[in-house]
Image (cartoon, rainbow, N blue to C red):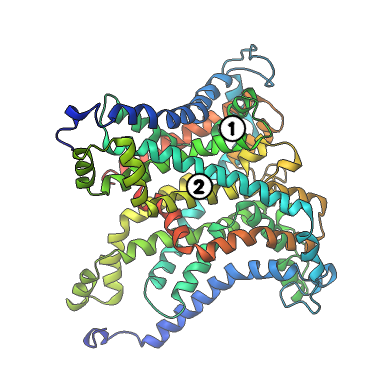
Amino acid sequence: MIASSARRQTGAGQMTAVVLFLPPAILLFTLFVVLPIVEAAWYGNYSWNGFGTPTNWVGFDNYRYVFEARAFGLALRNNVLIIVVSLLIQLPLALTLALMLAEKFRGAVALRMLFFLPYVLAEVATGLIFSFVYDGDYGLLASIYRVFGAEAPHLLASTQTSMLAILIVVVWKYFGFHMMLFIAALQGQDRNLIEAARIDGASRWQALRYVSIPLLYPTIRLSIFFAVVGSLQLFDLVMPLTRGGPADSSQTMVSFLYSHGVTRMRIGYGSAIGVILFVICATFAITYKRWFMRDE
Amino acid sequence: MNEPVRIGRRPPELATLYRVLFLTVVAAFVAVPLLATVLGGFKSLGELRTNPFGLPSEWEWENYADILTSRRYWRMLGNSFAISTMTSALALVVASMAAFVFAHLRFFGSRMLLNYFTMGLLFPAATAILPLFIKVRDLGLLDTYFGVVLPQVAFALAMSILLFRRFFKDLPTELLEAALVDGCTYPKFFRFVTLPLSRPILATVGTITFVHSWNAYLVPLVMLNSDSMYPWPLGIMVYQGEYTSDWHLILAFITLTILPTFLLFVFAQKHIVAGLTAGAVKG
């Protein structure tokens, strides 16, 4: 880029910059991101409570126990459920709202901000707000039931409905983020293309279906990526609502890792769960990028 | 709008009506839980049960006043503020320096090194939380701010470096060439030219890291074990545990803890929206 930079190398402080500017980032990243995941692969072969050094080698037993655990199966199923709901309900909702709110009209900006607000709130606060909404005695839902003279269900306390309750909160919290991505993309679109389509006789719907939405495909692919990666690491929201219960019915992979690995200080077992999660996340991210996001 | 195009469409009034109806339903879905939370904090427990939606018949200001005058509330916010400020400040310094090197200098292995950092985008901190705990413990940082700050900075690095690097690369190259001809060094150029020109991206990355750290739950939960060190997401869970079904108090507490986020959102809307969607749009 800079033609004669090689000649000025030392004079311009090139080496000084490299030697001064890079090490802090490399050190922090290696110490707290790369080493821990490498160590997880190592600890995962031991039965270890975290004191002293790991000596009790158990090979792949930890992994076998994880896959045999009923709670892990449920967690896996729930993570898949979250992904399905994110893709089939949340994304279409976000896209519809974006198409409505990308146009200028009175109140459009205020609505955009309102819909984005849940994304900014902490998961923990959101979870607590909804444990009030769902509360069988004081909650909003309960009082609606009472109006019709019906007994309020305790959504969070039943193995049948706990996951449904969490899925509703997931949509509430994250659709605004995806909507905002779509709005940003829509506003970057060339209006002339749509105008041209309309002049050529396309109806509003056709212009939308065959011009606007195809132009959004890269954003949709990106949005799917974020939805899946986010779903895989859902945890903060689950804790205030159900802590994975009742009877592990609303466990996610990370909440399973927390309740079965961290709280019981089973370092080996918990590390094995972490490694499984890592493999799922990394495999997904790499293949998805290779297959669907080649040019981005 | 062009008049001829409208021929043969449904009357626009009906479409508009559907749209208004749909937007109203979604707006209610989002706003009602939030409004009920804020108002609930002004009610007595008895009234909350009979009238959870409406305005309180009698405004109970003590719920809020008691929390605002309590030490724990301010200590929690203080902890959160300290952790988030340190996290975003450190992430800004460390990431912008590294990104500067990746943007302007080529050396043996620089491409590989950049790819090394990009790996950080592949997995969340949760995957390595137990080894991370062991590491922080062995460094003697358990139950300190830094035990939370350093891992958070490390996990923020990948995204921050990529955002910075792109911005630095887009700055006019003539600047650097001219400065080098005039005898300026790279570190000086970074300090006196690049950084002052980078306010927008500094604001964006600063906002992302601050908000994520402010809302973070898992890392502080694992690294801190005394109440006096807890940031607010941990503190609010403890509070909820103590006042299990005194929902009027819990709602007041929730309202007061999300108030700073809300104010930040209102006043720094542009940066927050730009920041939280930037990784997506440009990453």
The dot on residue A220 is none
Tag 2 residue? B209
Q: Label 2 sits on what residue type?
A: Thr
Residue projecting furthest to the left? A3
Say which chain tag 1 marks: B
* Residue beneath the point at 66% across and 19% down: A48
| SS category of the residue bearing label 1 | helix
Q: Are marks 2 and 1 in contact (CB under 8 Å)?
A: no
Residue projecting furthest to the right? B46
Callout 1 crowding tier (Cα within 10 Å): few <14, some 14–19, many ≥20: many
| SS category of the residue bearing label 2 | helix
The image shows residue B106 at horizontal and vertical percentages of 25, 31
The answer to which of marks 2 and 1 sits earlier in the sequence is 1
Would you say B244 lies left or right of B91 here? right
* Residue beneath the point at 39% across and 37% down: B97
**Considering only vertical position in the picture, is B80 above or below B255?**
above
Q: In terms of image quadrants, where is residue A220?
A: bottom left
The image shows residue A84 at horizontal and vertical percentages of 49, 51
* Residue beneath the point at 65% across and 55% down: A125
Would you say A179 lies left or right of A76 here? left
Observer-side mark, 2 or 1, equals: 2
Q: Label 1 sits on what residue type?
A: Ile
Say which chain tag 2 marks: B
Tag 1 residue? B129
Q: In terms of image quadrants, where is residue B217?
A: top right
Q: Nearer the viewer, residue B188 or A38?
A: B188
Q: Is residue A234 visible?
A: no
Q: Nearer the viewer, residue A95 or A176?
A: A176
**Considering only vertical position in the picture, is B28 above or below B182?**
below
